[in-house]
Image (tube, helix red, strand yellow):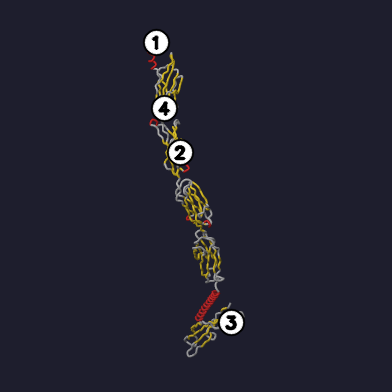
Amino acid sequence: MLLCSLLVIFAPVSEQSDWPTLLAPSSVFEGDSIVLKCQVKQNRKIKTMSYYKDGRELFLSTYVSNFLIQRALFNDSGQYHCAISGQFIFSWKKTSEAVKIKVQELFPPPVLTVSPSQLTEGTPVTLTCETWLPPQRLDTELQFFFFREDQSLGPGWSRSPELQIPTIWSQDSGSYWCEAQTVTHRVKKQSLKSHIHVQRVPVANVSLETQPPGGQAIEGGKLVLFCSVSEGTGNITFSWHKDATETSLGNKTQHSLSAELEILAVRESDAGKYYCRADNGHRPIWSEVNVTVRIPVSRPVLTLGLSGAQATVGDTVELHCEVRRGSPPILYWFYHEDVILGNSSASFGGGASFNLSLTSEHSENYSCEASNGLRAQRSHVVTLNVTGPDGYRRDLVIAKTLGGLFGVLGFVAVALLFYYWYQKTSGGSSAYNASSPGSQESTYSSPLPAVEELQLMYANDETTHPSPLTVTEELQPAYMNVGAADTDVVYSQVWCTQQTEGSANIRKTFLEIKDSSAIYSEVKKA
């Protein structure tokens, strides 16, 4: 009886010292590993060990063991305890006190922000995946990922919470979100989806320019039509039209504020008004420019206008130069043997003329040149022969004949003076017999109108003072056949008139004066 009582008294004391204790971490964040340990102070033979959460058995083991939660989640929060059981004489079970475990959030779900908030085409965009860590876990490393309509953006997972998009377009509109996770991949969270709308900028201030500038195209050359807008986003469609027709000369659609259309070989019919149309899905706008086609000059044609059938000295000839094609104004140059005679301008097209008074030096080749600033062209050479009139030729022959005759007479006069001087100085005298055996027959023509009187001085044995002797030379040629029948000799006959006191003038030839000397000059007729 006593033994039984002692067992009853000491049993509760020993049992209380063998109650298990549940060991658990004091602070738990999502993604952490949780190790639960059921600790027993005395080594007793334990038959089972079990762990409970909120009264529900989580784990049962037939040996002493810990309970591990690999990755803590929010639903792992609760009241945990453990229990052990065994048998000593009779079966027993002991339970630990409950331990409360609360799993804390490591970082909240990220929030996707867009800057700027109002997006227009062609502008840069910054996407930010925003979240934060608790002070106890600031050393936790995160990485981020961005998505648009189930398509990844950027390089993939990145330590940077920002993504730069250099240029965004209207087709980039859609749903965007981001993800954030720890580098250990234990916690991963996604932001809410955000719809991003990219607005287009309507085209504005369209202009149409040309090359060459000012719409001054040249026939056969290239014409470039430049169409541009000052602003406008997205795909812009440019189209070109002529003379307000619906038919398009060409169109281009591209991500650009300008486009161009080339006309490789301009024709005269390409002149007119051109239009450019720009449209990016909003209201289309137009611009216009007037194109003129300038035509280079063709080869000019030179014509000579004469008053008569033949060009003679003193005539006036009209040189007319004209091109068949060419845009005015046209400048013409006139040439004589590559020497510029003059120039003339045709302001409204057509030809130009130049009047020239002919001289004997104006024979040979003539040409003209035309230019309108685009190209210079030279005409073919036209030859002109200038001849003198009949009167001009007769006067020329007479002048040459008289010049020769006066030259001969001057020579004869010098010879006569020399001979006379020689006779006077030598004191000699000679007689010239005008007639000789077989004298020739003389024929005289009418005397010439010119008469020259010579005052001669002579001396003889009968007078001591010289008497004046007036010698009248009538320039009358005397033609005489001497010797051969076909030989003509021209003599100049000299008459002498001697004046004496108290007597009439005595007119004699030198042949009749015995003491006089006469010199005849002989000119043979060709």
Q: Position of residue 208 (x, y in %)?
A: 47, 52
39 or 485: nearer the viewer: 39
Determine the secondary structure under disc 4: loop
Is residue 24 visible in the rendered image? The answer is yes
Amino acid at pointer 1: Cys
User: Mark 1 and mark 3: span between their CA atoms?
Assistant: 216 Å
User: Mark 4 and mark 1: span between their CA atoms?
Assistant: 46 Å
Residue beneath disc 2: 176
The answer to whether 83 appears left or right of 302 in the picture is left
Disc nearer the start of the sequence (2/1): 1
Disc nearer the start of the sequence (4/1): 1
User: Mark 2 and mark 4: span between their CA atoms?
Assistant: 33 Å
Are discs 3 and 2 less than 8 Å apart at CB?
Answer: no
Count the labels in the image.
4
Residue beneath disc 1: 4
88 or 30: nearer the viewer: 88
Residue beneath disc 3: 480
Badge 1: residue crowd in 10 Å (few <14, some 14–19, many ≥20): few
